[in-house]
Image (cartoon, grey):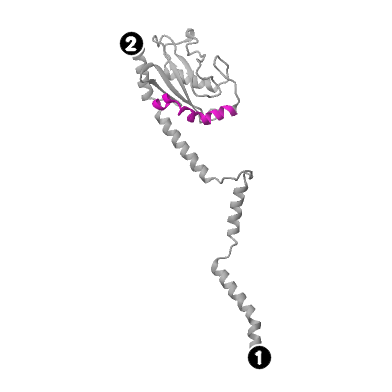
Amino acid sequence: MAERACVKRLQREFKALCKEPVPHVVAKPSPSDILEWHYVLEGSQGTPFEGGFYHGKLKFPPEYPYKPPGISMITPNGRFATQKRLCMSMSDFHPETWNPMWSVSSILTGLLSFMMDNSPTTGSLTTSDEEKRRLARSSLAFNCQNVTFRKMFPEYIQKQAEMQTLCEQKSEQQPVNKPGEPENTVAENRRNKDHNRHFMFPGWLGAILLALLCSIMALPLLSLDLTKQ
């Protein structure tokens, strides 16, 4: 059971986060357990994590802020293993380096900064930038399958729905190739149709040309009739 000082401290930190949000970081305590917080880190621009949304968990000890929390990541990201405690100076791996002045916001800001780095640690992974980008693209859809995530972060569920709608609209606007057809065939066919359309005669002009042709062909017959008369 959490100590009274721990509860007050965490409640105060949550109010501070609501009043002054930290860039690229969202964090909330579990409705049923104030010692368990869930967070979302948004990947920084210009990094392989750009566009990613990374869900994780902080587990605070009852003695917080005099003891550090455990930190884990839930969303696959290519930098940290999932469902495993991460080794950081701000985590329970290193209680000797913990500073009681640190808060939820400073912990998660430090985690986001450490995520952008390549320094190895317990729980870290080594993957290519392309793999990190792939995981970033699929991160939000992955999170939306998590029941706890859906309950705690409804704003991201709405974001996922908007992104999916946008993707569907874009796919409808793009031509689809037939199986075995080169990728640019449909686009070229469309351009050719547009090009040929410019050279099609309008209906009224075709009728005039047809009338003129018939008149020319009828001239020899008229001359023959006049000669007989």
Q: Position of residue 185 (x, y in %)?
A: 62, 48
Q: Earlier in the sequence, mark 2 or mark 1?
A: 2
The residue at the far bottom in this view is 229
Q: Is residue 135 magenta?
A: yes
Q: Could you tell me which secondary element the residue under label 1 belongs to?
A: helix
Quadrant into which the N terminus falls? top left
Identify the image quadrant of residue 21.
Answer: top left
Check whether the beta carbons of the residues at disc 2 and disc 1 lie within 8 A of each other. Answer: no
Q: Which region is colored magenta?
A: 130-152
Q: CA distance from mark 2 to mark 1?
A: 126 Å
- State the residue position of label 1: 228
Please determine whether, in this image, residue 137 is positioned above or below residue 116: below
Locate residue 72, reporting x and y percent.
48, 18
SS for callout 2:
helix
Label 2 amino acid? Arg
**Residue that mark 2 sits on:** 4
Could you tell me which residue is drawn at 59 percent across and 29 percent down? 130
**Few, some or many C-alpha atoms within 10 Å of disc 1 (few <14, some 14-19, many ≥20)?**
few
Q: Quadrant of residue 153?
A: top left
